[in-house]
């Protein structure tokens, strides 16, 4: 059965306008062979009403499992089990406490106000990062002017429903410094401009299967990140203000690409296939590269689209068949 004991409502910092509640849930089963039907994360420290507490996240629940039937919810934060703090425990210790008893009482922290969908954090708001685990309905997260060069940005506890992530001017050198980004399977737009990115991790990026807009401008990329050619839903790609000198042949695989921005790189050639073999491409910008005059003819022979826009050097053009 589920107990009705609840703690007082606790508020995050006022500008975030979230509230949460603590409660105790008692789970019972007839024998130890019956599965509780709950999976939990590792125990990590998080801020709670200004205090650092150690919590384990309920990651998933079996639809017909005891835990769900008795009131435990996904993304509940487990604070105690049978009156014992989970501080210092591993996930294995937590599961052992469950498996060794017929009755388990867990103290959990649950979200009561889930209306915040868009959050913007910048300098002097670093502390708010400790509350991201609580934002179940967050759709857009923007972070600007916070230095993550040493610590990295930990998004391992953020909701997987996030659609847009913007991290600019945060001194990132590689995508893997954003911990947990591979979990964001619903992400459609990723903006990592004005950082110090030198390469793009293939394994991480290929997990973002829903991504349609990727912006990596104003970084330190010396080569075209070929992993993007395997991102099947990508429609817009911006690599402006990098140090890219060559477009790889794999670019022809980008069958969904509509907009490609390559301004302010060091490109010397533009292969014909860029315009001839990308069926959805509608816009190509190439200003301030080292292209030869012949590159100004780009797109001129394309006959399969009604209109193709390009911007290269001093010439803007709309070419119709």
Image: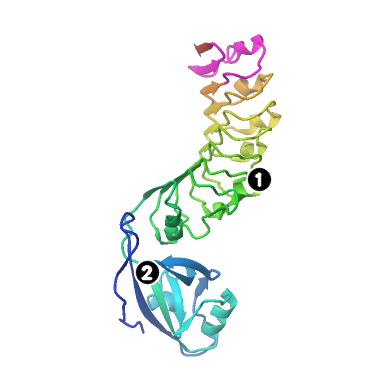
Report the number of discs. Answer: 2
Q: Are marks 1 and 2 in contact (CB under 8 Å)?
A: no
> Residue at horizontal 51%, vertical 23%?
282
The disc, 1 or 2, on the residue closer to the chain's N-terminal end is 2
Asked whether 312 falls inside the magenta stretch, the response is yes
User: Residue 97: percent from the left, percent from the top?
Assistant: 53, 84
Asked whether 93 falls inside the magenta stretch, the response is no
User: Residue 320: percent from the left, percent from the top?
Assistant: 50, 12
Q: Which mark is residue 110?
A: 2
In this rendered view, identify the residue nearer to me: 98 or 142.
142
Q: Is residue 206 visible?
A: no
**Secondary structure category for the residue under label 2:** strand
Q: Most prominent secondary structure in the magenta stretch?
A: loop
Question: Would residue 238 appear left or right of 117 to someone viewing this image?
Answer: right
Q: Residues within 10 Å of mark 2 (few under 14, many from 20)?
A: some
The residues tagged by marks 1 and 2 sit, at their Cα atoms, a distance apart of 36 Å
- Magenta-colored span: 286-314
Q: Is residue 213 visible?
A: yes
User: Residue 24: percent from the left, percent from the top?
Assistant: 37, 80
In this rendered view, identify the residue nearer to me: 147 or 158.
147
Q: Which residue is mark 1?
A: 202
Q: Which mark is residue 133?
A: none
> Residue at horizontal 51%, vertical 55%?
155
């Amino acid at each position: 059965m589920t107990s009705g004991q609840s703690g007082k409502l606790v508020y995050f910092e006022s500008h975030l306008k979230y509230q949460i509640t603590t409660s105790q849930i008692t789970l019972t089963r007839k024998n130890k062979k019956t599965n509780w039907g709950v999976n939990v994360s590792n125990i990590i420290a998080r801020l709670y009403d200004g205090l650092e507490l150690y919590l384990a996240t309920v990651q998933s629940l079996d639809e017909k499992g005891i835990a769900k039937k008795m009131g435990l919810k996904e993304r509940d934060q487990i604070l105690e089990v049978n009156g014992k703090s989970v501080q210092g425990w591993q996930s294995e210790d937590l599961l052992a406490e469950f498996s060794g008893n017929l009755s388990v009482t867990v103290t959990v922290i649950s979200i009561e106000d889930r209306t915040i969908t868009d959050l913007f954090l910048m300098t002097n708001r670093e502390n708010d990062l400790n509350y991201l685990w609580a934002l179940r309905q967050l759709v857009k997260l923007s972070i600007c002017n916070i230095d993550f060069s040493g610590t990295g940005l930990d998004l391992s506890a953020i909701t997987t429903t996030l659609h847009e992530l913007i991290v600019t001017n945060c001194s990132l050198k590689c995508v893997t410094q954003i911990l947990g980004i591979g979990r964001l399977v619903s992400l459609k737009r990723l903006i990592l401009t004005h950082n110090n990115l030198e390469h793009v991790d293939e394994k991480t990026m290929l997990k973002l299967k829903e991504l349609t807009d990727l912006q990596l401008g104003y970084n330190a990329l010396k080569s075209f990140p070929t992993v993007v050619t395997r991102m099947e839903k990508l429609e817009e790609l911006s690599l402006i203000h990098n140090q890219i000198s060559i477009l790889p042949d794999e670019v022809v695989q980008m069958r969904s690409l509509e907009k490609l921005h390559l301004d302010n790189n060091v490109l010397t050639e533009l292969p014909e296939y860029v315009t001839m073999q990308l069926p959805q491409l509608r816009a190509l910008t190439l200003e301030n590269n080292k292209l030869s005059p012949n590159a100004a003819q780009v797109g001129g022979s394309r006959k399969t689209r009604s209109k193709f826009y390009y911007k290269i050097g001093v010439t803007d053009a709309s070419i119709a068949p």
